[in-house]
Image (cartoon, coloured by chain):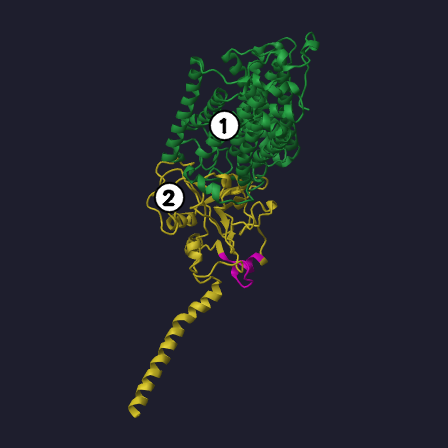
Chain colours: A yellow, B green
Amino acid sequence: MSENRTTDNGRRQFLGGALALGGITVAPGVFLMNVAGAKPAHEAVTSDVRWGLLVDTTKCADGCDACVRACQAENGWGGPDSNEVRSSDDQKAQWIRKVHLRNKQTGSTHSLPLMCQHCEHPPCEDVCPTGASFRRADGIVLVDKHICIGCRYCMMACPYKARSFIHEDLHGQKVNAPRGKGTVESCTLCVHRVDNDREPACVEACAAEGRRALIFGDMKDPGSEISQRLKRLGVRQLRADLGLNPGVHYEGV
Amino acid sequence: MKYDTFREVEGSKGFWTVFALFAAMVAVGLGAAWYMEHQGHWVTGMNNQIVWGTPHVFAVFLIVAASGALNVASIASVFGRVPYKPLARLSGLLAIALLVGGLAVLVLDLGRPDRLIVAMTYYNFKSIFAWNIFLYTGFMAIVAFYLWTMMDFRMRDYNKAAGMFAFIWRLVLTTGTGSIFGFLVARELYDSALMAPMFITMSFSFGLAIFLLVLLGLYHGTGRPIGDKILMRLKNLLGIFVAAVLYFVVVFHLTNLYAAEHAGAERFALLDGGIYTQLFWWVQVGLGSVVPLVLLFHSGLGRRRSSIVLASILVIIGGLAQMYVIIIGGQAYPLNIFPGMEVTSSFNDGVVAAYSPSLPEVLLGLGGVGIALAAVMLGVRVLRFLPDSLEDAQVDPHHARTETGEAEAQPAG
C-alpha cells in the first residue's frame, strides 16, 4: 500500500510539474498574443485588427536609407546584389523608396519613405481582372502570384506608383518573398513577419538606427502606440482626397 | 439587293500574294511575342513607369476600330438605310477580324500569356477588364449570329433584332474600352467620363477609315465594280466622324484647362510634352484630322477616290498617334502624389517618364494588324461576303431618278 502511495505521489508531482512547465511555456505566448493582437497560424486573419504604419517625417533623415536596405535584404530585391541583372534601372523593382520633397511656396524640405499604402479601398484590387490583387481582412494588400497574369492594370491604377513588374527570369529568391517573371509585386508589409508577431523589416531597421521614424501597429487597438499617436498628432494620408483610406500615415509633411 | 449576287472572291495569284504578306506579318508578330515571353519584358521599352507600351497602342486601336467597323452594318439594319445593305456582311466580318487581331496583341503582351486560362476562370467582377472579357467574347458571338441572319435566307426574320442588339452591344463595348482609362482617378490625363463617348466617336472614325480602305482594296484588287454613290456617302460620314472626335478632344482639354489643378498636365499635353505634344498637334490634329477634313469636304478634292484613300490612311495614322498620346503620354506625365511639392526619388517621381518603342513591340502590334487583314481575306475567299458589284444602280434603288443630282450627304440615322 505504502509503496503504491509513494508511486502515486511521484506521479502527482510529475504531472504537477509538467503542468506548471507547460503553463510557463504557453502563458507568455498567450499573453503576448493578446498584446500584439496577432493570430495563431491556423486561424484566418480577421478584421479585428487593421495593421498600419506611421511615418514621422521629422525624424526621417535625408541621407538615411536604412529602411530601403532592410526591405531589400528581407525580401530579396534591388540593392548591389540585385537578381534583376538584365533589367534597366527603370525596369527594376522598388518596393520602398526614399522621396525628397521641397515645398514650392515655402521652400521647406522633407524626406520620407514611400511604399504600398495598404489602402482600405485599394484601386489595384478593384481593377485586377482575376482577383490576384487582394486585401486581407487585417488591411494588408498583397498580390497572389499564382493568379497574376501580368496585365499591369493595377500599376496603372495605383496612385502611389507602389508596384513593380518583373521584367526577367529571377534566381536566388527569398523563401518568404516569392517573385516571378511576368508578375507584379509590391510591399507586403512583411506579412510573413507580422503573422509571426514581428514588425516589418523597415520599422525594425529604422529603430535600430535610433530614429524610430516608423511606427507599426494595430490601428484598431486604442491602446497601441500607433493609435495613440494618430489620435494626438496632425497626420495625413497621401492623396486623402481620393478617399482610399490608406493604412500608412505621414506626420510632419 | 438580291442575295445571290454575293460571291466568294477568286483566289488569284495577286490575292494570295497579298495574303502571304499579311500571313508573314502574323508570323513575325508571333515570333516577337515568343521572344518577349521567353526573355521577359526587359527586351521591350516598357518599364515600371510606362507599363503599357506600343502593343497596347495597337491593341486598343484595333479593338476600338473593330466596334466602329460594325457601324456600316448598323446603319443598314438599325437605321434602315438601304444603300448600306450590300456592305453589311463585310462590315460584320471586319469587326470580328479587327477584334481578334487586337485581342491577340493584348493577350500576347501579358506578363504571363500562358495563364490565359486563369483569366478565363478567375473573375473579379469589380474590374472593367473582367467586364471586357465578356463584352469582347460576347461581341464576337453576337456579330457572328448577326452575320448568320444576313447570309442565311431562313434567318432573315432575326436580322433586324440581331442588328439592334449588336449595335447596343458595341456601344457598351466601346464604353468599356474608354472606361479602362476613364476610371483611373489618379492619372490626370485619363480620369474623365468623357473617355467613354470620345472612344465611341473614335471607333466610328477609325473603323470607317479601315472599312473604306479594305472595301476599296478588295474591289480594286478583284476587279469588281464599285460606284461613286456609295463611296460619297461613306466619305461624308467619315468626315462627320473625324469632326466629332475633334470636338471631344477640344472639350476634354478645355475642361482640364479650366481647372487650375490640371494646369501642369495640360501644359505637358499641349505645350512642352516633347514627342507627345508633337504627335498631338502635327499628327493627331493636323495630319489625322484637319487634312482629312479638307480632303473629304473640299468641293473638288472631295470627289476624287485618291482623296478618300489618302484621307482614310491619314485618319488611321492620326488615330494611332492619338492612342499613343493617350496611352503612353498619359503614363509619362508624373503622378501628383504630393500636390504643391517638388519631388525627387530613385523611382522617377516628379519627372516625365522615358519610353521608346522597341522593335519586338512594334512587330507584335503589326502582327495584330496582319491577323485582322489575313482573316478578312480568308473570309471573303471562302464565304459570300462581297457583292459582285457595287455600281450605283446596284446600290441605290432610286439611282435612275437621282442620277444627275449630287450625292447626298447622309449621316447615320
Can you tell which of label 1 and label 2 is closer to the viewer?
1
Tell me if residue B315 can be seen.
no
Tell me if residue A141 can be seen.
yes
Subunit ID for the residue under disc 2: A
Residue at image mark 2: A79
Number of other residues with Cα within 10 Å of mark 2, as a class: few under 14, some 14 to 19, many 20 or more: some
Give the camera-side residue of A38 and A15. Answer: A15
| Disc 1 secondary structure class | helix
Whole-percent x, y for residue A142 in the image: 47, 49
Subunit ID for the residue under disc 1: B
| Disc 2 secondary structure class | loop
Picture quarter with the C terminus of chain B: top right
Q: Quadrant of residue B144?
A: top right
A67 left or right of A221 in image: left
When the figure is inspected, residue A187 is found, relative to residue B311, above or below; the finding is: below
On whether residue B352 falls in the magenta region, the answer is no
Give the camera-side residue of B97 and B361. Answer: B97
Q: Amino acid at mark 2?
A: Gly
Most distant residue in the front direction: B154
Most distant residue in the top direction: B404
Q: Amino acid at mark 1?
A: Phe
Picture quarter with the N terminus of chain B: top right
Residue at image mark 1: B58
Q: Are marks 1 and 2 on the same chain?
A: no
Magenta residues, as a range?
A: A216-230
Whole-percent x, y for residue A197 in the image: 43, 60
Give the camera-side residue of A20 and B81. Answer: B81
When the figure is inspected, residue B3 is found, relative to residue B401, above or below; the finding is: below
